[in-house]
Image (cartoon, rainbow, N blue to C red):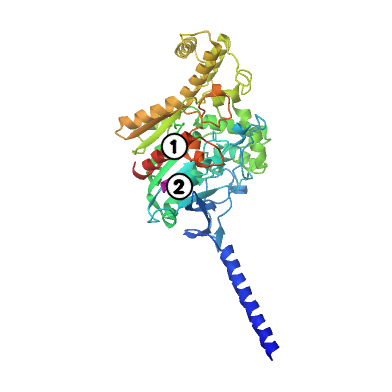
């Protein structure tokens, strides 16, 4: 009898242990915050950053996957899902080329996608700090990545906003959007009207308006921020009447919507699209609608392998936002000239050496990451002339007097024959033309319309910079400091750089909170 009781007790204990283990398993498998969205529930995960709690949600779908008949179309709302969506894994990146210009070089490799590429890429991510009460009505910052409208992804390590969010108590959102021809093909048919990538961004902004309150954010305090093509995108949302009501403030880092490389005319967009179609075997006597049908049968990975066949020149990219009569009814310059843009405070600026990165990609013979090359007078004139030839809007040679005026301006008259001075001034001309001057022009338009404008100039060359010293403070270098990368102890930034990063993050987030 006693043995039976002992056996029975042991069985009960085992059952109790199993129940506890099962409960623990359910607890572990279900661990992480669950939030309701208008399309269904999502479950993220909680991490700790510098001892502070941060809820992260990766890969929340905000539009239907742009596959098959949805390729090239404007985005469409995703259907509701059942159950709880796992939002703990970084999403796939949109289709784009792999940069192998400089093999095994960290300075370029860091910008390559760190998740698999796929057409099924329209997802967004949310970082929610759980630091200071109340956990609601927090300022929201929405990041739009750059990459010349043909590359980039929200998942890059350098864009991880965990320090930005927890150190400054703001919610950060980032989204993927379609790139290259898949995002910006232009055909005279409703199936491929252009600007699909911009409308992806806009649909993500609509998602923020509908859902961010459930994450503790305020839909009435949303700041867009972006760099390069991301900054240009922010600027296009500032001028488009379709986007102006979806956010409150804007930060533009090294980019502006009226720069020559940002948009093209419908005829130029259509011409490039037909040329690409011909390269891919989808032209001949086909109508635009038939070309689109043909291109939908082409493997998505083939597009980026052929896109640069349609364009050439320094800071020129194949497929761009277009003046489509829908998202953009006129050129960004015309919007600004007429004062037709969102009236709101701006924070914007440029880096000291915006042009150097583009020169080492465009002209490796004269600009090298391995050698300190000299530039001749003849080469200076050739490069200055080419700068002003390849504008989509003005495909005509620069006349003799224009070239001489620019060369006069970008000559160091204390040492006019110095070949390294020539190199540096060519890079300055590239940066001024495509980035610094458009950013300053945008600031002027806003200031003249009575808006608050905060303009920065970033010239710190960070201690871990792998690019050669002659390239200075490159296009994109400020991103490390905006996202708090120096605060990561594993990276080895200096104490001064940590302080600089904290200061920049405070400027950005104070602007987002109060303007």
Residue at 56% across / 26% down in the picture?
Answer: 358
Where is residue 58 drawn, in percent x and y? 54, 51
22 vs 175, nearest the viewer: 22
Q: Nearer the viewer, mark 2 or mark 1?
A: 1
Where is residue 484 drawn, in percent x and y? 48, 40
128 vs 182, nearest the viewer: 128
Q: Earlier in the sequence, mark 2 or mark 1?
A: 2
Task: Determine the main secondary structure of the stretch shown in magenta.
Answer: helix
Q: Is residue 425 above or below residue 238?
A: above
Left or right, residue 236 beside residue 110: left
Q: Is residue 462 above or below residue 219?
A: above
Residue 19 position by quadrant: bottom right
In 3D space, how far apart are the residues under numbered discs 2 and 1 (Cα atoms)? 16 Å
Residue that label 1 marks = 499
Using the image, tell me which numbered label, if any, was put on residue 314. none
Q: The N terminus is located in which quarter?
A: bottom right
Magenta region: which residues?
Answer: 164-170
Residue that label 2 marks = 165
Can you see residue 178? no
Where is residue 377 drawn, in percent x and y? 55, 9
Residue 148 position by quadrant: top right
Q: Regarding mark 2 in the picture, which secondary structure is present there?
A: helix
Q: Residues within 10 Å of mark 2 (few under 14, many from 20)?
A: many
Q: Regarding mark 1 in the picture, which secondary structure is present there?
A: helix
Where is residue 165 drawn, in percent x and y? 45, 47
31 vs 492, nearest the viewer: 492
**Contact, mark 2 vs mark 1 (Cβ under 8 Å):** no
Q: The C terminus is located in which quarter?
A: top left
Can you see residue 123? yes
Residue at 59% across / 33% down in the picture?
Answer: 273
Q: Would you say residue 374 sits in the magenta stretch?
A: no
């Amino acid at each position: 009898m006693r043995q039976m009781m002992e056996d029975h007790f042991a069985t009960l204990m085992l059952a109790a242990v199993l129940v506890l283990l099962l409960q623990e398993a359910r607890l572990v498998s279900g661990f992480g915050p669950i939030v309701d969205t208008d399309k269904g529930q999502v479950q993220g995960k909680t991490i700790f950053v510098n001892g502070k709690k941060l809820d992260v949600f990766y890969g929340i779908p905000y539009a239907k996957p742009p596959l098959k008949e949805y390729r090239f179309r404007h985005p469409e709302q995703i259907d509701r899902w059942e159950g709880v969506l796992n939002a703990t894994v970084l999403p796939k990146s949109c289709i784009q080329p792999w940069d192998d210009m400089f093999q095994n070089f960290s300075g370029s490799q860091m910008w390559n996608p760190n998740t698999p590429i796929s057409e099924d890429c329209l997802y967004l991510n949310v970082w929610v700090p759980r630091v200071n009460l109340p956990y609601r009505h927090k300022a929201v910052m929405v990041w739009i990545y750059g990459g010349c409208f043909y590359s980039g992804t929200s998942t890059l390590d350098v864009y991880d906003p965990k320090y930005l969010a927890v150190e400054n108590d703001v919610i950060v959102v980032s989204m993927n959007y379609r790139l290259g021809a898949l995002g910006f093909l232009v055909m005279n048919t409703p199936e491929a009207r252009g600007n699909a990538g911009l409308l992806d961004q806009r649909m993500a902004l609509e998602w923020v308006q509908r859902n961010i309150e459930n994450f503790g954010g305020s839909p009435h305090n949303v700041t867009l921020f972006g760099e390069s093509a991301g900054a240009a995108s922010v600027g296009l949302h500032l001028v488009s009447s379709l986007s102006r009501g979806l956010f409150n403030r804007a930060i533009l880092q090294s980019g502006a919507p009226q720069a020559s490389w940002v948009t093209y005319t419908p005829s130029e967009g259509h011409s490039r699209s037909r040329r690409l179609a011909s390269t891919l075997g989808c032209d001949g006597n086909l109508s635009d609608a038939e070309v689109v049908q043909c291109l939908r049968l082409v493997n998505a990975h083939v597009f980026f392998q052929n896109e640069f066949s349609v364009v050439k020149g320094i800071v020129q990219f194949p497929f761009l936002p277009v003046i489509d009569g829908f998202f953009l009814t006129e050129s960004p310059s015309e919007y600004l000239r007429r004062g037709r843009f969102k009236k709101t405070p701006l924070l914007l600026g440029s880096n000291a050496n915006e042009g150097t990165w583009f020169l080492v990609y465009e002209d490796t013979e004269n600009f090298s990451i391995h050698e300190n090359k000299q530039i001749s007078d003849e080469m200076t004139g050739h490069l200055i002339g080419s700068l002003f030839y390849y504008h989509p809007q003005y495909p005509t040679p620069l006349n003799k007097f224009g070239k001489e005026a620019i060369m006069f301006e970008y000559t160091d008259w204390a040492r006019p024959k110095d070949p390294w001075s020539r190199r540096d001034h060519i890079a300055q001309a590239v940066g001024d033309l495509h980035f610094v001057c458009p950013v300053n022009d945008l600031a002027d338009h806003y200031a003249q319309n009575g808006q608050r404008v905060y303009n920065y100039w970033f010239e710190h060359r960070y201690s871990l910079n792998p690019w050669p010293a002659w390239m200075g403070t490159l296009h994109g270098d400020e991103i490390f400091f905006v996202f708090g990368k120096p605060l990561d102890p594993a990276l080895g930034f200096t104490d001064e750089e940590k302080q600089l990063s904290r200061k920049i993050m405070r400027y950005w987030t104070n602007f987002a909170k109060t303007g």
